[in-house]
Image: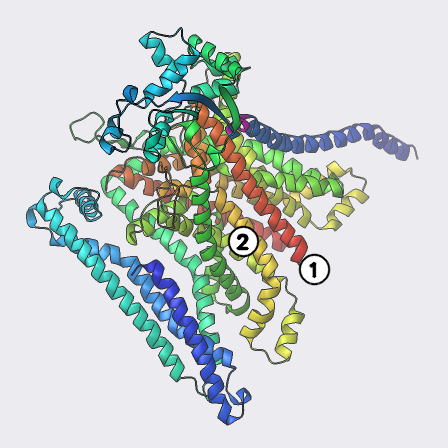
Amino acid sequence: MQTANLLPLILVIAVIAYGLSYMRSRAVAEPIGGIRNLKALPFYYAARAALWCAIPALVVLALWAGFEGKVIQNYVVASLPAELAPESDGQASLILSQINNVAAGKLDPQFVPPEVVGAADLLDALKQRSASFKATLVILLAVLGAAYAWTRVQPHINARENVERTLRWIFFVCAAVAVLTTVGIVFSVIFETFRFFGKVPFTEFLFGTSWSPQTALRADQVGSDGAFGIIPLFTGTLLISAIALLVAVPVGLLSAVYLSEYATRPARAVIKPLLEMLAGVPTVVYGFFAALTVAPFIRDLAESIGLEASSQSALAAGLVMGVMIIPFVSSLSDDVINAVPQTLRDGSLALGATQSETMKNVIFPAALPGIMGGILLAASRAIGETMIVVMAAGLAANLTANPLDSVTTVTVQIVTLLTGDQEFDSAKTLAAFALGMMLFIVTLALNVVALKIVRKYREQYD
Amino acid sequence: MTDQRSQAEIVRQSLKRRYRKERRFRLYGMTAIAIALLSLVVLFTDIIGKGYTGFIKTTMTLEVVLDGEQMYLDDASDKDQMSMADFQAPIITALQKHFPEVEERKDLRELSRLAGSYASNQIKDLLARQPELLGTTQTMEFLVHDTVSVYVKHADNPAYSIRLSEQQQRWVDELVEKGVVDTGFNDVFFSRGDSREPSNAGILGAIVGSLLTMVVTLVIAFPVGVAAAVYLEEFAPQNKFTDFIEVNINNLAAVPSIIFGLLGLAVFIGVFGLPRSVPVLGGLVLALMTLPTIIISSRAAIKSVPPSIREAAEGIGASKMQVVLHHVVPLAMPGMMTGSIIGMAQALGETAPLLLIGMVAFIVEIPDGFFSSATVLPVQIYLWASSAEQGFVELASAGIMILLTFMITMNALAIWLRKRLERRW
C-alpha cells in the first residue's frame, strides 16, 4: 500500500479511536456520578487515544518511507554478481537506473544482461514486500496504540496532563526544526566540501586566479584538470555587489531620511508600501528585466559613446540588484532613524539648526552604527542573490574590475555546476558544494556582525 | 554691543546659504524617492509592454480537403497507415488555393512554413478521433508558425520581421487582409503545458505545479511555524538551548535561498532518495525556507495578545496549555495568517533553490499529483526568458504578469486580513 493511502487510513483509525474513547469515558463516568468525577474531561481521554494511535504510526511510517528506497537499492546492488559489481559511484548509478527502468517497464529486458533483469525482478519483489510490511506494521501500531489508550480510559488517570505534555513535546520538536535545518545545511555542504578538498588543494581553491571547472572526460585531453581558483568568482561577486550597494545605499538612505523627516503623513502612507513593493517583486522578474532590457540598453549606450561593452555586463546586473535592495536599506535605516530619541532632535532644532543640519550633524552620527548594520545586511543579501546574476551576469570567469565586462559570481557557478549534466563524484560537482559552503560562511558572518551592531546600538538608547 | 550685532549679522548673512542647503538636501531626498519609484514604473511598463502580446494568439483558418490519396492513407482507423501518412500535404494544398501562382517546390516549402509545426498533428488527431472524415472537406483553425505570429503581432515594427523572407511577408499580409490569418485571445496559453514551439506553449502546467508545491509548503510550514512560535513564546525555558534556537531562526531568515537548494539536493534527494523535480520535494525545500518568516511573524502576533487575557483565563483555572490553545492562539490567528500569506507569496516567487533540485526540467504534461514531475511559475519564466525566440520572450513576460497577479492578490489578501481581523488592544 502506498504511503499516500496510509496517511488517510491512519487518520481514520485515529478518529475512530477518538470517538470510541470519548464514548468509553462517558460510560466510565456514568456509575461514579458523571464526568465531574473523572480526572479529566472526556475530550482529553479521546485526544489521548488519538495521539497514541497516530504518533507512533506516523513516526514509523516517516522513517520507513525515508529509508526504504536506499536500503532496497543497496540490497539490490549487493546482490549483483561479481563481474557486474560497480567499481565507482558513476557505474553504480548507471546500473541502478538500468535496473529501475527495466523494473518500471521503460526498458526492454532484451537489451540488458540477464543479471540486470534478475536484479529488476528482485527490486520489484523487495518493493512489494517492503510495502506490505510497512502497511501491516503501521496499521498494527495504530490499532495497538488506540487499543492501549482505550483501556487506559479510567477515572483516576489524568489524561489532560498526558495530552498537554505530549503537545508541549510536539511544539518543542517544531521549534527544533530550525536547528535541524541549520544542521542539515551544514552537513549537506561539509561532507562534499571535504571530498572536494581531497581532490583540489585548499590553497589552490582559495588563492587560484583561474576558474574553469570543465574537466575533460579523458585524462590526456587539453584542460583535463580544470582550474578551481575562487578569486575570479570572488571579485565578480564583489564587483556586482559593490555596484548594487552604490545604487541602493544613497537612494535607500536618502529616501528613508526624507520619509522620516520631511514627508507628510499621507505621502508617507503611499510611498512606503510602494517602495516595499520593490522588495516583493520576485527575483526572476528582476533577472528578466536585467537581461532583456537593462543589459542591451547599457551595451547600446556604451557603444554609442565608443566604449566596448559585453552584452552581459556586471553593470546591468548590479544596477538592477541595487534597485532590488533599495527597500532593505530604506526600511532598516528608517527604523534606526526613528529610534534616535526625539530629545536629540528637539535639542538641535532649538539651537537654531535647520532640519538638514540636525539630520547631518546629530541624527546621522547617532544612527550610524545601525545604518552600517543595515548596509551589511543588504550586502549579504546582494552576495547571496542568485537569479539576477544567473540571467544577466554571464558565465565567463573574468578577473576584471571593468563593470562593462561580463563577470560571474559564486551563486551563478553553483547553479551552473549543479543544473547541467552532472558527473558523479567529479571535482566539478563537488566544487559547487565548496562554493556553497563559502557562501554560507560569508553571509552568516555578515549577518551575525550586522545583528550584533544593530542590537548593541539599540540598547544604547533604550 | 557692536560685537553682538555683528554676530547677528553673520548669522543673518549665512541664513540664505543655509536655507539653500536645506532645500538642496530636501531635493536629494525627493530625487532618491523619485528614482526608486521610477524604477518600479519602468519595470512594470517594460514587462507589460513586452508581454501583452503573449496573451494574443495568431490563427489561420483553412478549408482543408482530407484527401486520402494525397496523404497516402485509405483507412484512417488503421494505426500503421496513420503513422506513415503525410498530414502536411492537405495544409499545403489549402494554402496553395490562396496563392495559385506558387508552384515551385522551394516556394511551396516556404509557404508551408507559415503554418505552425503542430498543424499536421491537428489533422492527424482529428482523423484518429473520427476516421470517417477521410475524404471530406473541413474548415479548421491552425496556429500559425511562431515567426508569422510575431510578425503579425508587431506589424508596425520592422525589427520583428527579419525571420520571414520578403515573399513570406507578402503572403502573410495578403492572408491577413483576406481574414484567413487572424488574432484572438490566447486560450492555448492557459490550457497547456510547456512546448518547444512558442505559439503552442502554455502556462497551465506551471500554474498547477506551483499550486501543488504551495499546498505542500503550506501544509508543512504553517503548523510547524505556529507550533514553534507558540513554544518559543509561551513554553520555552530561559536557557542556552532556547537562545540557540532563536539564533538559528534569525540566521536562517538571512541564509541565501540557493543554500536551501543545496540542502534539498544533499539531504532530501541524496539521503532520503526523494525523486527529483516533484512538487513534494519543492514544497519541502520552500517550507524550510519560509519557516523563519512564519515563526517570526507568529511570535509577533502572540506577543501582541495582552497579558490580561492570559491572566483572566488562568484566574478561572485554565491550565497553561488551555490558556494558549483556547485564548492566545485564536486571538493571534489573524496576525499569524497574515505573516504566513506573506511568507507563501515569497515562496511562490522563489526560483533559485528549485533550479538545484531539478524543477527546471522541460515538462510538457500538466502535473497530476504531488509525485509527478512538475515545474513552477518562476522557473517556467526563467526557462522561457533564457530561450532565444521572440515568442518565448513574450510568453515569459506574460507569465511574469500572471505571477505578479498571484502575488499581488496574496498580499492584498494579507492586508485585508490585517485590516479586517486584527484587533488593536
Q: Identify the mark at residue B424; answer none if there is no mark.
A: 1
User: Coloring scheme of the render?
Assistant: rainbow
Q: Does B176 appear above or below A328?
A: above
Q: What is the quadrant of residue A149 in the picture? A: bottom left
The region drawn magenta spans B50-54
Residue type at tag 2: Ser
| Residue B98 screen position, x and y as percent | 44, 12
Q: Does B21 appear above or below A16?
A: above
Element on which disc 2 rests: helix
Q: Nearer the viewer, residue A43 or A78?
A: A43
Whether pointer 1 and pointer 2 mark residues with C-beta atoms closer than 8 Å, the reply is: no
| Magenta stretch holds residue B52 | yes
- Is A123 on the left-hand or right-hand side of B369? left
Q: Residues within 10 Å of mark 2 (few under 14, many from 20)?
A: many
Position of the N terminus of chain B, as image quadrant, is top right
Q: Name the residue under label 2.
A: B340
Element on which disc 1 rests: loop
Magenta segment's dominant SS is helix
Q: Identify the mark at residue A264; answer none if there is no mark.
A: none
Position of the C terminus of chain B, as image quadrant, is bottom right
Chain under callout 1: B
